Image: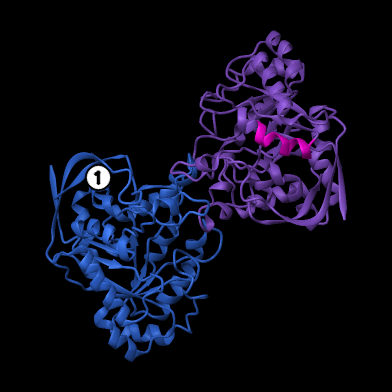
Chain colours: A blue, B purple
Amino acid sequence: MSLTLNSPLDMHLHLRDDAMLSHVAPYTAEQFAGAMVMPNLLPPLTTKEAIDAYRKRIETATGRDDFRPYMTLFLKETLSYERLVELKPSIIAVKLYPSGVTTNSDTGLASIDVEGLRPTLEAMSELDIPLSIHGETNGFVMDREKEFMPIFEALAAAFPKLKIIMEHISSKEAITTLDKYPNLYATVTVHHLLLTLDDVIGGMLQPHTFCKPIIKTPADRDAIQRAVLSGHPKIMFGSDSAPHPKEKKESAAGSAGIFSAPVVLPLLADFFDRHGKLDLLQGFVSDHAQNIYGITPPEHIVTLEKAEWVVPEQIFDVVPLFAGQKISYRLVK
Amino acid sequence: MSLTLNSPLDMHLHLRDDAMLSHVAPYTAEQFAGAMVMPNLLPPLTTKEAIDAYRKRIETATGRDDFRPYMTLFLKETLSYERLVELKPSIIAVKLYPSGVTTNSDTGLASIDVEGLRPTLEAMSELDIPLSIHGETNGFVMDREKEFMPIFEALAAAFPKLKIIMEHISSKEAITTLDKYPNLYATVTVHHLLLTLDDVIGGMLQPHTFCKPIIKTPADRDAIQRAVLSGHPKIMFGSDSAPHPKEKKESAAGSAGIFSAPVVLPLLADFFDRHGKLDLLQGFVSDHAQNIYGITPPEHIVTLEKAEWVVPEQIFDVVPLFAGQKISYRLVK
């Protein structure tokens, strides 16, 4: 049995730079027609020049006409209307990181001050540039996303024309909040869709499933699954694939991030198939994102077949999600 | 300023065997007059001969007359009255591990069947041999201890003369259960007293604070702190110090266990001092255990002074708790 997807999109991706970029980007480019690329490099991407140069490095690393990187800007300071007009051709969204919540987020916003953000967000509303948010506080690890919900609500209410993307949602509270405001949207990762905290700390310690937001409870996962399996049009796939070298993960102070890129479409096909909802996969991995962002990605037909394979233990110096495990779908190359 | 403790006791300790035993045992023996030693070796300690031989190896490793190992038996099968009469001179307690909950527990009990345990537990009641329990189910990692509470209650009600020790309690529910039955007692570790899950997965991943039961929420920690700082006579100190080589912790499948032995008394002195309760430390680290177990440990005066030191980054091939961090009390040797 095989399955074709028209121009799948990964709407949340970390590609890193230099050697890591060249190692990991082809895995995404072979499965997707495009990906929204995160700007948390060191230093973060805050200028048109830096973003355009990074896009070129990504295009060199992938070397395919049927894959388009959709770029983002790291929000550090007020952006004027004029600045955003200049940036708009180079970006698909502006990304907001609260300071300290994840890898390379130290230069993010120390506090989310809705009124302080007003000039920037009004200009973004007018120019129809979406705001992408890593929605976590600095509270207790299991409560950080839940605690951030009032901020999503305040932003959605204050800027009703602004599209706000709740990135890599991990909690049942996020699903509830998503449905309260028409201008809230969400990405869901394959790991928050399939796993729970038991897969991180329930048996032996699994550093390769450690990420932020932390993977949460069975109740949280079930709420995310129900929403995705309902064909929710405001939810789109974003892998948050975030490679770190094995030695940075298996360490006394392990880095947060899961390298899922090599396995995301096979895992999603298996998940939708097991739930008898393969007809909803196209929407989740492409159509919803095209509607939300108003984009038309390159033509790129991706075929998967139902055939078991074993995920490699290591890809270059990175351990991928489901390393050494069997998956029931595979990419037809 | 200095502080003396009379015959402190660590009522839950993993000393391992062979080279690891010889490396770690001296850290406990210099701080304590005795320790209750866990039987989860490979193979587990299930016979008088194995227990007596292990005691001798511990005595060789510590080489001190003022330190006494209190031995335990790993419960695998029904123990007759006669068998327990024979074992009693060699042990202080029988340890019950549900299968699969922690290091080397695979041969533990697959289910906790109160009636199936009746012959063993009635004989133990009659002979006044306490039952020590790792109280976790195989459920979701954050709920395992809470889910075990009905089993503690059923055992406490069915065997009212049996002393039952709830080991290394980690949840507010355990504090509540402890107070429901006069024959329930508890040990508390220094890590469950001081840390939360944020210290494991809240920032970078910290494999050296990963243990079972997992360290839980601020509310759980606060409930444990309140109980300990009330001078609760049914709560005693048990470190659950459980060394694993650094490479087994910083791994793709990291072992559960914290090597706290080198720092436990300094950390406890600091904690009780910060809360203005230094007068309650003697009870927590010795008197309560002497009363509960009816033991008289060797004379062993331990002195601590208020003087800052930095915990070594590594002790042999093990990374201790608080490695590289400052502690405000130190042992006077």
Residue A163, how many percent across, how many down?
Answer: 33, 75
Above or below — where is A81 with respect to B143?
A: below
Nearer to us in this view, A305 or A24: A24
Magenta segment: B22-32
Please identify the quadrant where the C terminus of chain B is shown.
top right
A231 horizontally vs A77: left or right: left
Assign a secondary structure to mark 1: helix
Residue A254, how many percent across, how many down?
Answer: 48, 54
Nearer to us in this view, B109 or A69: A69
Point 71% across, 24% down: residue: B71
Residue farthest toward the bottom in the current orientation of the protein:
A82
Figure quadrant of residue B199: bottom right
Point 39% across, 69% down: residue: A40
Figure quadrant of residue A83: bottom left
- In the rendered structure, does residue B161 fall within the stretch colored magenta? no
Please identify the quadrant where the N terminus of chain B is shown.
bottom right
Figure quadrant of residue A56: bottom left
Nearer to us in this view, A131 or A60: A60
Three-letter code, disc 1? Asp
Residue that mark 1 sits on: A270
Point 24% across, 56% down: residue: A27
B130 horizontally vs B117: left or right: right
Residue B37, how many percent across, how many down?
Answer: 69, 29
